[in-house]
Image (cartoon, grey):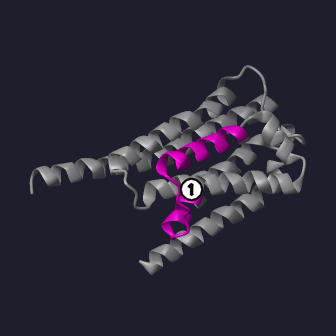
Amino acid sequence: MPGLKLAALAGAVLAVVGVTLLQPVADQLFAAHMMQHLLLIAIAAPLLVMAGMGARLPPMAGWISFVGIFLFWHWPAAFQWAARNPFTEILELASILAAATIFWSTIFQPSPLNDGARALMVMTAAIVTDLPGVVMLFAPHAICTMPDENAARFGLTPLQDQQVAGLLMWVPANLVFFGIATLLFARWIGMGERSANP
């Protein structure tokens, strides 16, 4: 078990290092900025919780704090404001990581919720946090760009950059969220069957 916790911690550190390494590109490419968010929410935060570094709130408070902070930082005015200053960039990324860690703590750590309720929390969080990605993917023009946007340097238009960002938010993130929800749901069903057939 200590080895597993150490491996989880190492994975979380690598994810955070990846966020740092992406920063020069993320200043110019919105998709890279969304990749930073994805690394924090779907990799670093769950691994930190598995390593025993989670922070607990009541389950609904954890869900609301994660969804609220996620939606706030995916509002164009908010992330563009944050991108103008290194301190506010750190504030944005740190608050996303903290909120995601709190959320995954309510999912992975002991709580009054059974696994079925936890699966439902993960699925509803996934659906709500999909909304900005769907908007980015299907918007007719670029509404989400970085202040120093330079998509042309990467062979993209600003709209294509936004569409790639929307796909990143929608597909890889959902693979993680729905994968975890499926495991929790299967475990809940299995526990119900074991209690019905002792």
Near-viewer residue (187 or 28):
187
Residue at the location (55% across, 39% down)? 171
Looking at the image, residue 8 lies above or below residue 138: below
Instruction: List x then y, in percent, for residue 173.
Output: 55, 45
Residue reaching furthest top? Answer: 140
- Span shown in magenta: 45-72
Task: Looking at this view, name the residue that lies furthest to the left.
Answer: 198
Q: Left or right: 18 with respect to 23?
A: left
Q: The disc labelled 1 sits on which kind of residue?
A: Ile
Helix, strand or loop at disc 1? helix
Q: Residue at x 87, y 40 (%)?
A: 150
Q: Quadrant of residue 166?
A: top right
* Residue 21 horizontal side relative to residue 121, left or right: right
* Relative depth, front residue between 81 and 61: 61
Relative vertical location of residue 122 with respect to residue 75 in this rendering, above or below: below
Q: Split into 4 quadrants, where in the image is the C terminus?
A: bottom left
- In the image, is residue 61 above or below residue 101? above
Residue 121 shown in magenta: no
Pinpoint residue 102: horizontal percent, then vertical percent: 56, 56
Q: Position of residue 80 (x, y in %)?
A: 84, 40
* Residue ID for mark 1: 102
